[in-house]
Image: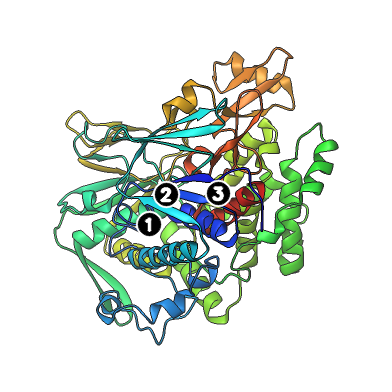
Amino acid sequence: MYKSSFQQVAILGGGPSALFIFKRFVACTLPELSITIFEKDDRLGYGMPYGQNGAADEHVTNVSGNEIPELMSDLADWIKKVPKDTLDKYHIDPDNFNDYKVLPRLLFGQYLNEQFNLLLKQARENGIETTVYYKSKVADVIDEPIKKNVKVLLEDKRKFDFDRVIICTGHLWPVRNEGNVRGWFDSPYPPAKISIKADHAVAIRGSSLTAIDAIRTLGRHNGTFEKIDGKLCFRADTPNFKIDMYSRNGLLPAVRFHLEDSHLGKETVLPVDEVKTIRDQNEGFLPLDYVFEKNFKAGILKQDPEFYQQIKDMDMETFVDWIMEQREQADPFELLKQEYAEAEQSIRKRESVYWKEMLAILSFAMNYPAKYFSAEDWLRLQKKLMPLISVVIAFVPQSSAETLLAMHQAGKLDLHAVGEDGSFEPGEDGGVVIDGIHYQTFVDCIGQPHLKYEELPYPSLLKNRTLSPARLRFRNPVRGRELTTVGQQKAVSDDQGHYYLTVPGVSINDSFQAVDEFNALNERIYIMAVPFIGGFNPDYSGLDFCEAASKAIIDSL
């Protein structure tokens, strides 16, 4: 039996992140452990993506059953127990379902909810006292170092004291113009708000999975999809309905394919000792180029030697430019059609598209050491690598690709590149103006933004300086000085002449513990909320993140 210095633990949020950290607690036999979960909705497990706040009947997951970290019951086995009328609603035959298929998101939410309920039952059997407060939104978190506890305040003024608090709140979509500008939506969530009839052109910012969510909803409510000779076709209800997507580079995301490593190389994360050795050799920094070689090119050499011969002499910038140039030269919908066929063959033969899989592994593996990048490397990452990653490893489900192709073929969906300087301004009569074109309806679909330190919704953590903004030091002080000279406020300096780049979110250590401005860790507060750790974890998301972060937290505790 483990020993612990804490008994009262609060988990803020009851979605997938909370599910995985709670699973870790249940697996550990901690004496006299008491856990309290605060959930703003009326059910656990769903979070935003898998409940009514983030999905409707038309939305599907972009992960299959074999890619889901282990829970209480296997997804394929669970499907066999789902009521027939529910399966019929989603056209699912339980006898033909397997772990390589994706699910409707709302149905997957039911699965996660049942897993949470099974864990609650096991917790009781293990003697772990668990209390769940539904419909309970947290208004503030107050760290009390002298008392060595943390106070949680709810919007209804109730107060609770805990030894440890784990912030597991998920997606947060800032409201900027929505509600003040008619026809402007700051996100497509909840999808009910854009379930509208539109006998006019609708503008969408972005072309990622978030944009596809909006397209599926708008398409469903403004037309009919049907299979003709095995091909999905779309017929609009009104003559003027159309969707115009606007993205920086005018690219569509790639289609999901068969993954050789269904959990994307969790074992490829650089070992702690190796990170320390490399940092000792590089003034405390971990070079991005080292991670690119170890977590991308080395895997390509092993899995696809022929492709490696084409890239072996390329650095990161050269490789990204090479791939992006190929994509930009092709018509995006023709490329989508080609990648759809490639993905179909990959899934049928159960053979990976290795360079894409290795890029996904790189995306996962670089999060842990990203806090040790120099500011220069972080800027390179954001400018070069992240745009490619966001396109190639979105893993668009086949059915979503079919939807896009059907609507484009019908003349009801187009994609436009706006470049780095594209502007999206509210119109005088509502809607949006893009490059001089006015649309009366606009949906911002750039995806979950990495939020600023100042946007954390718990004012006392900021007021009391319990947390600190995430910052990365410039290896070359001249570069940092240049940024401050031209008025970019992201760069700051200290009294020792070091320059730092302020990146999104708050500062955390490898165990997801909060770190204050004096670089002192806070052993009472852990942060698993993806929107607020984006500076130090540039591409963490999804269930794999939930599992990896929960392990780091439990190991620390």
* Relative horizontal placement of residue 7, taking residue 378 as reference (left or right): left
* Relative horizontal placement of residue 553, taking residue 175 as reference (left or right): right
Mark 3, residue position: 540
Q: Nearer the viewer, mark 2 or mark 3?
A: 2
For the residues bearing labels 2 and 3, Cβ distance under 8 angstroms: no
**Seen from this angle, which residue lies furthest bottom?**
95
Q: Which residue is rendered at x = 15% and y = 54% of the image?
A: 197
Mark 1, residue position: 44
Q: Which residue is rendered at x = 66% and y = 27% of the image?
A: 519
Mark nearer the N terminus (3 vs 1): 1
- Compared with 46, 454 (above or below) is above
- Mark 1 and mark 2: span between their CA atoms? 9 Å
Amino acid identity at mark 3: Tyr
| Residue 447 picture location, percent across and down | 42, 46
Asked which quadrant contains residue 77, the reply is bottom left
Q: Nearer the viewer, mark 1 or mark 2?
A: 2
* Relative horizontal placement of residue 527, taking residue 104 as reference (left or right): right
Badge 2: how crowded within 10 Å, few (<14), some, or many (20+)?
many
Work out which quarter of the rendered image holds the N terminus and state it.
Answer: bottom right
Mark nearer the N terminus (1 vs 2): 2
Mark 2, residue position: 37
For the residues bearing labels 1 and 2, Cβ distance under 8 angstroms: yes
Asked which quadrant contains residue 218, the reply is bottom left
* Relative horizontal placement of residue 37, taking residue 217 as reference (left or right): right
Badge 1: how crowded within 10 Å, few (<14), some, or many (20+)?
many
Secondary structure state at the residue bearing disc 1 = loop
Q: Nearer the viewer, residue 484 or 424?
A: 484
Q: Nearer the viewer, mark 3 or mark 1?
A: 1
Secondary structure state at the residue bearing disc 2 = strand
| Residue 352 picture location, percent across and down | 61, 71
Q: Which residue is rendered at x = 33% and y = 35% of the image?
A: 158
